Amino acid sequence: MPVPAPRAAVPAGAAPALPDAGLLHRRIAAWFDAAARPLPWREPGCGPWGVMVSEFMLQQTPVSRVLPVWEQWMQRWPSPAALAAEPSGEAVRAWGRLGYPRRALRLHAAAAAIVENHGGAVPRTYPELLALPGVGTYTAAAIASFAFDAPETVVDTNIRRVHARLVSGEALPAPSLTAAEMRLAQALMPGETGAKAWNAGVMELGALICTARSPKCGQCPVLDECAWVAAGRPEPRHVPRGQAWAGTDRQVRGAMMAVLRKATAPVLPGLLLGSVDLVTAGTAESPGGVQAELNRLRQLNASDEQLARCLDGLLADGLAEASPAGVRLPA
DNA sequence: CATTCGTGGAG
DNA sequence: TCTCCAAGAAT
């Protein structure tokens, strides 16, 4: 494949000239038709609730891990009312190991709000969606666009990266979404009839081709329009900070949540805090697999203070609740 | 604007 | 093995 001719450098501080938007729209739409993954929440019969559930699950979580949980979830709770009718703890348990379990809590709360304020039907406007728990600017625009074909501008991490490279000539977008990026995204939007396809197409392009690490530029439908490639693929300006994990509260909280999800009965606080073991407590409290999860928690070697802080945090966040018999998921 | 909040597959 | 990071939201 021929290397595109270098493009004139953009003077520092000047806004880069917009590429031919119509060309981008046609190229990416054609590529999407041929290369898009067959995801169930994109099927015509999916419905707004299925789209909404997928958007919650996909927040910071890869598609491959969402797929099986989404299928189970939709079978068990085919409507917001079905989910809202059960305790939030059931949502947290069904969430499984998707991560960020507070999302399950928020999805449950959003379902309750939909029943309470919208007659059980997912609202279709951006402001109404934005008012739901767990719905931010991205998710509100995504549901409006993908579920209702509303002409909203969707900007997620994939779209930001595509825009950064294709238009701005940078390897990666800024650490946080800027007003300039939002203006650019709006300027690139096609007419109303093409908004949904454009949003989905650019997002998919970022997910499959214009990836964060080792992008597959050889398969890119707009390679010859890419400002980053034209500039010789400069290195990223900001090196993303690695997410710490070992020894963090997040790790300890995760291990505690694994215990609570597995438990079929309330768990004595002393077990979570490491001050007593199952032998001391009596083996009656160790149904199915709880011991294994408790061992994992103990192997983290968390301090007494950290264990107490994390348990308090889970209780404060509503991910767990204290009953007379011990700690359990919200009932 | 910077932090916090889970998890596990891929490179 | 170890680092990176994936359709963000709330504070």
Image (tube, coloured by chain):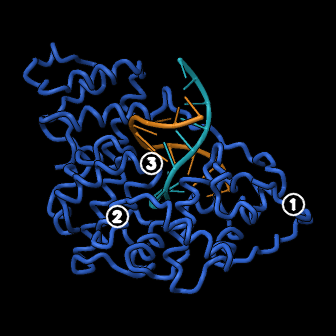
Chain colours: A blue, B orange, C cyan
Local crowd size for mark 1, using a 10 Å CA cut-off: few (<14), some (14–19), many (≥20): few
Residue located at (23% from left, 48% from top): A94
Q: Earlier in the sequence, mark 1 or mark 3?
A: 1
Q: Residue at x 60, y 81 (%)?
A: A190
Q: Position of residue A276 (x, y in %)?
A: 23, 18
Left or right of A224, for residue A204: left
In three-dimensional space, the C-alpha distance between marks 3 and 2, rounded to whole angstroms, equals: 14 Å
- Whether residue A125 sits left or right of residue A186 in the image: it is left
Relative to A198, A114 lies left or right = left
| Badge 3 or badge 2: first in the primary sequence | 2
Q: Name the disc covering residue A102, or none.
A: none
Which disc number belongs to residue A5?
A: 1
Q: Amino acid at mark 2?
A: Trp
Which residue in the structure is indicated by mark 3? A62
What amino acid is labelled 3 in the image?
Pro
Chain letter of mark 1 equals: A
Decide which of A129, A171 is in the foreground and name it.
Answer: A171
Q: Position of residue A128 (x, y in %)?
A: 39, 79
